Image (cartoon, rainbow, N blue to C red):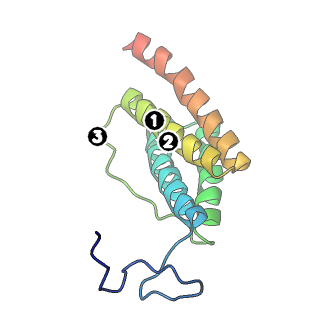
């Protein structure tokens, strides 16, 4: 009734079989994704520090850089720019959204240190948003 399979499968089902391309584990993929979200959050935090200097943003910047370096195996994040044209409320909204994405990934990989850090950042940016939009 069924035609037999005549070609070798592209998916290896044999234990110990090696393929010709690298595979990453779920944890490695989550580390890469989380490091990306944190690096983006760090970039927005740096832009906010330039616009509205504060000790809170300074401390957050250091903590974010440490976590990015930890997730990237000791490689420090590269400073980036390009958000200078955005207003402070827009930067806070962007940072809040990025922190939310990072929180989802941190929870998925059970990284409580990062989860606490980004939850604190979400609160800080959420607190900054109403006062900024009311003042505009």
Left or right? Give the position of 120 relative to 129.
right
| Mark 2 residue crowding within 10 angstroms, few (<14) / some (14–19) / many (20+) | some
Where is residue 80? Give x, y as percent.
40, 58
Image quadrant holding the C terminus, namely top left
Tell me residue 11's x, y (percent): 42, 77
Nearer the observer, 37 or 49: 37
Residue at 69% over, 40% down: 116
Q: Which residue is mark 2?
A: 101
Q: Which residue is mark 1?
A: 97
Residue 38 x %, y %: 53, 51
Label 3 element class: loop
What residue is at 50 percent from the left and 79 percent from the top? Answer: 13
The answer for how far apart the CA atoms under marks 3 and 2 are is 23 Å
- Disc 3 to disc 1, how far (Cα)? 18 Å
Q: Residue at x 64, y 57 (%)?
A: 67
Examine the rendered structure and indicate whether residue 19 appears above or below residue 23. Answer: below
Q: Are marks 3 and 1 in contact (CB under 8 Å)?
A: no
Mark 2: which secondary structure? helix
Q: Which mark is residue 85?
A: 3
For the residues bearing labels 2 and 1, Cβ distance under 8 angstroms: yes
**In terms of sequence position, does the residue under pointer 3 or pointer 1 come before the other?**
3
First in sequence: mark 3 or mark 2?
Answer: 3
Disc number lying in front (3 or 1): 1
Q: Is residue 77 above or below residue 101?
A: below
The image shows residue 60 at horizontal and vertical percentages of 62, 44
Q: How many marks?
A: 3
């Amino acid at each position: 009734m069924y035609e037999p399979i005549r070609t070798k499968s592209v998916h290896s089902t044999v234990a110990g079989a090696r393929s010709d391309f690298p595979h990453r584990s779920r944890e490695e993929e989550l580390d890469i994704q989380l490091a990306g979200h944190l690096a983006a959050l760090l970039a927005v935090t740096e832009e906010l520090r330039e616009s509205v200097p504060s000790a809170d943003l300074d401390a957050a910047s250091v903590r974010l850089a440490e976590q990015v370096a930890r997730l990237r195996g000791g490689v420090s994040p590269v400073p980036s720019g390009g958000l200078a044209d955005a207003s402070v409320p827009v930067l806070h909204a962007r940072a809040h959204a990025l922190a939310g994405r990072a929180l989802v990934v941190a929870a998925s990989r059970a990284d409580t240190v990062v989860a606490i850090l980004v939850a604190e950042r979400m609160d800080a940016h959420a607190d900054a948003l109403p006062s900024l939009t009311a003042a505009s």
